[in-house]
Image (cartoon, grey):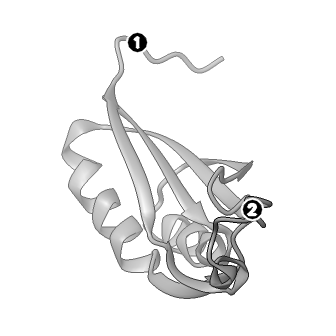
Amino acid sequence: MKLIIAIVQDKDSNRLSNLFIQADVRATKLSTTGGFLKSGNTTFMIGVEDQRVEEILELIKDSSRTRKQFMTPPVNLDASMDSSAAYPIEVQVGGATVFVLPIDAFHQF
């Protein structure tokens, strides 16, 4: 067995959750917060048999899209900095960060 931990942007979580239901994939859904943009994320924890790992990775890949977003960097009070540093910059967000870990034991009570 494997444990899949998938961190996706909140905008993609409902679509992914629906795909999991259609594919009969049981997942635990946790609300999390990203560190870089401090934006909402959803973390899915999925315990699955080895032969279904690729199928689930494809579901995650198909539902988690990257997109561009503008953000304003924090203001730096250093006078030597160029004044353009406070203008919004375009960054890429979304997609998925996925960890696949081996499971030594699985119990359901």
Could you tell me if the residues under marks 1 and 2 are in contact, i.e. CB atoms within 8 Å?
Answer: no
Q: Who comes first in sequence, dot 1 or dot 2?
A: 2
Q: Quadrant of the C terminus?
A: top right
Residue 98 rendering spot, x and y as whole percentages: 39, 50
Q: Which mark is residue 67?
A: none
Q: Is residue 87 above or below residue 12?
A: below
Query: Residue 96, relative to residue 87: is it above or below?
Result: above
Mark pair 1, 2: CA separation: 50 Å
Mark 2 is on which residue type? Asn
Residue type beneath disc 1: Ala
Disc assigned to residue 105: 1
| Secondary element at tag 1 | loop
Mark 2 is surrounded, within 10 Å at the Cα level, by few (under 14), some (14 to 19) or many (20 or more) other residues, namely: few
Disc 2 secondary structure class: loop
Question: Which one is in front, 91 or 44?
Answer: 91
| Residue appearing at x 44%, y 62% in the figure | 96
32 relative position to 4: left or right:
right
| Quadrant of the drawing holding the N terminus | top left
Please state if 57 lies on the left or on the right of 29 as rendered: left
Tell me: 6 left or right of 15.
left
Q: Quadrant of residue 97?
A: bottom left
Seen at 44% across and 80% down, the residue is 66
Q: Which residue is located at x 49 percent, y 86 percent?
A: 67
Image depth: mark 1 or mark 2 in front: 2
Residue drawn at x 59%, y 84% as measured from the top left: 89
Q: Position of residue 8 (x, y in %)?
A: 55, 62
Q: Return the x and y of residue 45 as percentages of the image width and height.
A: 54, 42
Q: Position of residue 47 (x, y in %)?
A: 45, 36
- Residue nearest the viewer, comparing 8 with 58: 8
In the image, farthest residue toward the front: 80
Q: Residues within 10 Å of mark 1 (few under 14, many from 20)?
A: few
**Mark 2 sits on what residue?**
76
